[in-house]
Amino acid sequence: MSMNLVTTLYLIASICFIQALKGLSHPTSSRRGNLFGMLGMALAIITTVGLVFKLGSEIATTGIGYVIVGLLVGGTAGSIMAKRVEMTKMPELVAFMHSMIGLAAVFIAIAAVVEPQSLGIVKQLGDAIPAGNRLELFLGAAIGAITFSGSVIAFGKLSGKYKFRLFQGAPVQFAGQHKLNLLLGLSTIGLGLVFTFTGNLGAFALMLALAFVMGVLIIIPIGGADMPVVVSMLNSYSGWAAAGIGFSLNNSMLIVAGSLVGSSGAILSYIMCKAMNRSFFNVLLGGFGGAVAAGPAGAQEARPVKSGSSDDAAFLLTNADTVIIVPGYGLAVARAQHSLMELAEKLTHRGVTVKFAIHPVAGRMPGHMNVLLAEAEVPYEQVFEMEDINSDFGQTDVVLVLGANDVVNPAAKNDPNSPIAGMPILEAYKAKTVIVNKRSMASGYAGLDNELFYLDKTMMVFGDAKKVIEDMVKAVD
């Protein structure tokens, strides 16, 4: 395999990745985007394996075995996880994948530092790694370490299964936290520069250790309400880590793919921060200058609410001309998207205009609710983003909120002291009637009480979303 052919194949793979991102920008073209992504990755892997053989018989015979084992293990694990992972576990899976990308970048950097001749960075044993390559290895390894440890914390926070305080949804804050983060950041950069200009392995090792610690400290002060942004941000970090290592290995495919992931993740994070009225740099730096966390869930004073049954809710829905459905994480937990689609179809057949409203950060990862509805084959023309549907709430007869909390909380507009003050929300409170399905009155992921639940126009329907919706479907008949 000639180097010209390798370059050409990598270029084609890069074009496939660009087309994949373009396709994933809209539900109607997402399948095509996924196909382009798979084709590009397959082409990149085949080209890389061919390149290993080109490097020489010795490297090919000793190294290709490791490559094949890695492909089999990674491919098998990926296939099994893709089949087993439920929709509610998708955010944790994404965080886990980010951690693996970051760790891979760290391992490659360590291998390059310890045995640079084996990766082609130098030709002879004992040759010094050029300063430019050492800078690239420092950046790739540091970002990879931060990505790995930060993603592990994000995984724990998203999962909500672990009692360890660092994995709790509430922010973990302590005195002098920002100063410590700043000190660690400056120390990491300083040690990285020492390694860059002197090649000192001790400085490289200490830099890595500090980067791992910094990844933890950056993520723990970020509260549950900001976790979708964190997932996107870590996605960006993993891309930049891959790009940094790509420069060291002179691998154009890694550079292009890493840059695409890094830049797209950064842009998405910025868009989401804007949608949440969060400072992009505050979130990027681990809540630096962020608001103090809200009180713990369940700490609010008990207040009376108006509650009803599934039959009551079905009566209101069938007698409405217009209905907007707001899906949230509770819908995903109950796996009720297919029952919801059945309810929407029956209401539509009765002449009710049904729309679905999606907040940019609904659920626990970007696009969580979009994928959930697509899985249930909800027509794309019925699904609207926040900025396209907010003006409709004032003319809507009934809004059905299913498991959503923070994204419909009027405190964002009415309470300047609220931690989510200024955050754009779905303006469900403007509708004539609001139906809210929750399992209990527990606060949402941000730990805040919701004034929407206490309005005179709001009726609470308590219970598992799937059971409640199924009962609504029966009542509509």
Image: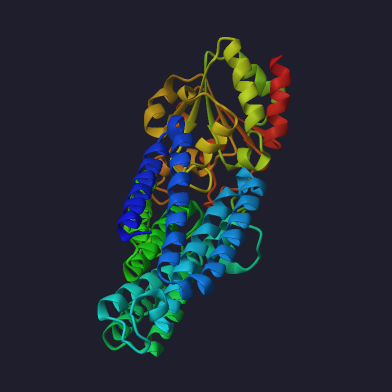
Q: Is residue 185 left or right of residue 79?
A: left
Residue 316 lies in quadrant: top right
Q: Position of residue 149 (x, y in %)?
A: 50, 69
User: Which residue is at a point 35% across and 47% down the rendered structure image?
Assistant: 12
Which of these two is toward me, 83 or 112?
112
Q: Position of residue 184 (x, y in %)?
A: 38, 79
Res. 161 in view: yes
Which of these two is toward me, 414 or 241?
241
Q: Is residue 45 left or right of residue 158?
A: left
Residue 156 lies in quadrant: bottom right
Which of these two is toward me, 179 or 431?
179
Res. 173 in view: no
Q: Position of residue 100 (x, y in %)?
A: 52, 63
Location of residue 60 with respect to 161 vertically, above or below? below
Location of residue 369 with respect to 356 vertically, above or below? below
User: Which residue is at a point 46% across and 55% down the rendered structure image?
Assistant: 46
